[in-house]
Amino acid sequence: MDVCILGKKRLVLKLFILLVVLISAGNLAAQFGGGNGTQDSPWQIGRPDHLDAMRNYLGDEHSDKYFIQTHDIDMDIAPWNEEEGWLPIGNNDNRFHGHFDGGEYVIRDLMMNRNMSLTGLFGYTSGGTLENIALEDVDLQGGGYRSAGLSGFAENVTIKNCYVTGSISVDGSQTAGFIGAAWGCTITDSWVDIEYTTGNSWDGVFIGTSYGQTQVHNCFALGTLRQNNESRQNIGGMFGMLSSASVSNSYSRVDINVPDNSNRVGALVGRNLNGQIVNSYATGRIVAGEGSNTGGLSGDNGGGCESSYWDTETTGQEESANGEGRMTRQMVYPYDTANTYVRWDFEEIWQHDTQATHNDGYPALHFEEV
């Protein structure tokens, strides 16, 4: 073959390959606001369709994908506010392995009305990080096993500086306002304020079930929890159950209402199976029917507890499976420093609500605006 003709064919082939690459890159970029999915140049998420496109790039154990939110996102528009609403990102077969930075922008009015397991903004997250995510006015109805506002199930995920507000009503077990079930996670500087209704067991407003050496630090839960079926168990203001997991420097101010014969109900933890509770407190009122096994801090304890307290007056509970009960005047500023909040760090972790304008005088965490 003539050398000149061969050279031309090779040039045409190279140009064709380059064109295919450019078209593919253009199509990919059109799904996001910019970036290329790397740590140095994450894909930019600024609209609902950008958020939805993340499900097409879940990554795997060997290939991380990076995303960053660049604007507030309003999900109260079609098709996201119609029929079943949002479809969670990631499931049992295709898990989200990536890194999502919310950039401290807000995702507002996320609606889900799906009778399925693993519901939330994310259904199943594995590895990677979720940080700086703000979910406001979430409306989650009808979710099944392992459902929550942020992620139904989180496995070996680092979660920091995230929060969820809104209303959640689910029937499955291991459900919550923040994470349905957390295995091997590290969760810090995060919170929820949720009106939460559950019809099953192993449920809490922050995390339903926390296990696999999950560590929760510097977090809190606000809102209400209502259990609408009898004879359920492991219901907590912050955690349904701690199993080989720990919580430290955290608090719950969730009011709980459970029916007759509920078992293992606690203002902070329903059941501390073999976990650790350190430097934490609970104040939410528990209204329980006859025969319910309730506690001011934990309903049942098979683990450890150190320097943690519940308010006997506001919770309405004189007993607890662990922790130390205190009267309100001993727990609000200026505290009974001789035997309350012993060895707590009020320099780096906690702060005083000296005017009782933010947290009714109870200690607040360092990142709260007091």
Image: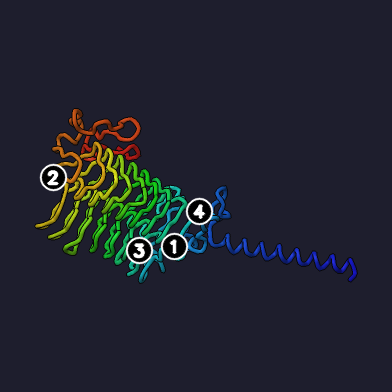
Q: Position of residue 66 (x, y in %)?
A: 52, 53
Nearer the observer: mark 4 or 1; the answer is 1
Please name the amino acid that badge 4 sits on. Phe
Q: CA distance from mark 1 to mark 3?
A: 17 Å
**In the image, farthest residue toward the left:** 290
Q: CA distance from mark 1 to mark 2?
A: 42 Å
Q: State the residue position of label 1.
A: 90
Residue 155's place in the image compared with 329, above or below, is: below
Q: Position of residue 126 (x, y in %)?
A: 44, 56
Q: Which tag, 4 or 1, sits closer to the chain's start?
A: 4
Numbered mark located on residue 111 in the image = 3
Please name the amino acid that badge 1 sits on. Gly
Q: Which tag, 1 or 3, sits closer to the chain's start?
A: 1
Circles 4 and 1: CB distance less than 8 Å?
A: no
Q: Secondary structure at mark 4?
A: strand
Please name the amino acid that badge 3 sits on. Met
Q: CA distance from mark 2 to mark 4?
A: 47 Å
Q: Nearer the viewer, residue 186 or 251?
A: 186
Q: Which tag, 1 or 2, sits closer to the chain's start?
A: 1
Q: State the residue position of label 2.
A: 319
Circles 2 and 4: CB distance less than 8 Å?
A: no
Numbered mark located on residue 67 in the image = 4
Nearer the observer: mark 4 or 3; the answer is 4
